[in-house]
Image (tube, rainbow, N blue to C red):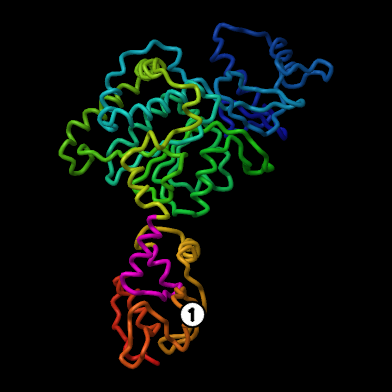
């Protein structure tokens, strides 16, 4: 391809050739590819005339170097590298994996490995069916992703990712550490792949990062931007495999976009009692995928599975639910809100400074700081400015138990706390703050009695 008086190799767009270099490069490649082919000096001159500088009335996109639009597209199962549109060429970056032209061998090593890391038959079937569907319908985008979770390191998540990389082809795979590059401004290069592996995923519930990831999993087109290129809408075909060592609390229990597998087992590195056996399984599967016929054996075995045509477009989480997904259900927003309400009620707390509210919520389950507004509001709390402990006014949440007894003069009306100097249940704001700090295990001298005012 040529663009802005420079030439680009469609197989390696990172390299740019200047006009005075391109003839030497082409001659060398022609000699390497066709060692018995010979041309006279005049023959070479005619060859380059047609290739590099043909007369306008004899321009032929199949015989000359076309003008590159600067765009790249990813069209799985399409072997055409150059696609012409409106007089310019667009490059198709999908590449058919070489192993698919070979004859496969038995995939016993992969079978032993996958049965060990996913021992539950039903869960393993869901994963394998997802993998088969994505491989069989490469031109379609799945609407849900796989997430591998393990609390410990060295449980085989990366090994399984390596198997998938070989199945889809390294040229068709994007691999990133963390989510920043995935959801960043210039994420076009990552999304121009069939398989996208995102390792060490860690985001907060309700955060912009969490919402961006969920959108990428479900949407089949997105606004993309490459450096020195305008923003435009591009279709994506990505299948996402994510790994994490942190319980994905940012996923709601009703989220149908992720199937979460627990990869914790006794074969983990650095202390697992089944480590030696697991190491042998990992070594065997890595040896198998080193050779094209080994990868083809896995591919052939997978392709023999009978998978519904719409399997990758929806997953029934009521039917297919793993133990990790069950745990997330217990930590769903409603459950977290209920725990918070019970905790505050048990300690007779009806007043919480905003600077402590986020810490209080986070003690139950990690959330982004804006989550406190929703949770406290849904519990019926109000927000206001108050002064206590002899300091300036600060924002705080408070629960109204009686519209006739709103917080005033550094006091709040509680459920059952009474002051010996009062006939009704007033308590100082300072004592309420101390109660919250006790829950958070913040060691500070209790000064509530010093500020008791009626």
Q: Position of residue 383 (x, y in %)?
A: 51, 73
* Camera-side residue of 215 and 315: 315
The residue drawn where x is 53% and y is 38% is 218
Check the picture and name the quadrant holding the N terminus. Answer: top right
**Disc 1 designates what residue?**
394
| Residue 351 sits inside the magenta stretch | yes
* Camera-side residue of 19 and 116: 116
The residue drawn where x is 45% and y is 43% is 255
| Residue 112 sits inside the magenta stretch | no
Under circle 1, the secondary element is strand
* Residue 41 position (above or below residue 425): above
* Residue 10 position by quadrant: top right
* Residue 428 position (above or below residue 210): below
Q: Position of residue 120 (x, y in %)?
A: 28, 31
Residue most toward the right? 57
* Residue 117 position by quadrant: top left
* Residue 277 position (above or below residue 409): above
Specify few, some or many for label 1: CA neighbours under 10 Å numbering under 14, 14-19, or 20 or more: few
Main SS, magenta region, reads helix
* Camera-side residue of 375 and 229: 375
Residue most toward the left? 273
* Residue 334 position (above or below residue 25): below
Residue 90 falls left or right of residue 214: right
* Camera-side residue of 448 and 219: 448
Using the rendered image of the protein, determine whether residue 427 is visible from the camera's viewpoint.
no
Check the picture and name the quadrant holding the C terminus. Answer: bottom left
The residue drawn where x is 38% and y is 79% is 414
**Magenta segment range?**
335-361
């Amino acid at each position: 391809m040529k663009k802005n008086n420079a030439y680009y190799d469609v197989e390696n767009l990172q390299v740019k050739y200047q006009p005075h270099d391109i003839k030497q490069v082409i001659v060398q490649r022609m000699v390497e590819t066709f060692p018995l082919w010979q041309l006279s000096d005049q023959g070479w001159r005619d060859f380059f005339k047609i290739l590099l500088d043909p007369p306008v009335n004899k321009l032929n996109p199949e015989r000359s170097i076309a003008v590159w639009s600067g765009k790249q597209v990813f069209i799985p199962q399409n072997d055409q590298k150059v696609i012409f549109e409106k007089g310019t060429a667009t490059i198709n970056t999908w590449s058919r994996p070489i192993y698919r032209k070979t004859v496969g061998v038995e995939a016993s090593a992969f079978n032993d490995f996958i049965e060990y890391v996913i021992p539950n038959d039903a869960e393993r079937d869901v994963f394998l069916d997802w993998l088969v569907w994505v491989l069989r319908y490469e031109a379609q985008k799945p609407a849900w992703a796989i997430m591998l979770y393990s609390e410990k390191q060295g449980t085989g998540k990366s090994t399984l990712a390596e198997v998938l990389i070989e199945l889809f082809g390294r040229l068709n795979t994007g691999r990133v550490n963390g989510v920043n590059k995935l959801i960043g401004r210039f994420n076009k290069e990552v999304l121009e792949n069939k398989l996208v592996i995102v390792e060490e995923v860690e985001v907060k519930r309700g955060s912009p990062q969490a919402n961006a990831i969920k959108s990428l999993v479900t949407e089949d087109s997105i606004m993309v931007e490459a450096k020195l290129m305008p923003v435009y809408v591009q279709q994506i075909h990505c299948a996402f495999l994510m790994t994490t060592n942190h319980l994905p609390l940012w996923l709601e229990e009703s989220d149908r976009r992720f199937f979460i597998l627990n990869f914790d087992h006794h074969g983990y590195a650095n202390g697992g009692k089944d480590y030696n056996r697991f190491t042998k399984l990992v070594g065997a599967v890595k040896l198998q995928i080193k050779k094209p016929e080994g990868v083809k054996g896995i591919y052939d075995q997978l392709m023999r599975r009978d998978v519904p045509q719409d399997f990758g477009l929806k997953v029934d989480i009521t039917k297919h639910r793993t133990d990790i997904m069950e745990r997330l259900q217990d930590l769903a927003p409603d459950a977290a809100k209920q725990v918070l309400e019970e905790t505050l009620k048990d300690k007779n707390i009806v007043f919480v400074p905003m600077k402590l509210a986020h810490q209080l919520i986070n003690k139950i389950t990690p959330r982004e700081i804006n989550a406190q507004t929703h949770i406290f509001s849904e519990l019926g709390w109000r927000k206001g400015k108050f002064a206590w402990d002899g300091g300036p006014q600060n924002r705080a949440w408070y629960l109204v138990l009686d519209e006739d007894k709103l917080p005033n003069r550094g006091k709040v009306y509680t459920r059952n706390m009474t002051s010996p100097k009062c006939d009704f249940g007033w308590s100082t704001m300072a004592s309420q703050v101390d109660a919250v700090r006790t829950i958070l295990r913040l060691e500070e001298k209790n000064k509530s009695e010093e500020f008791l005012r009626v």
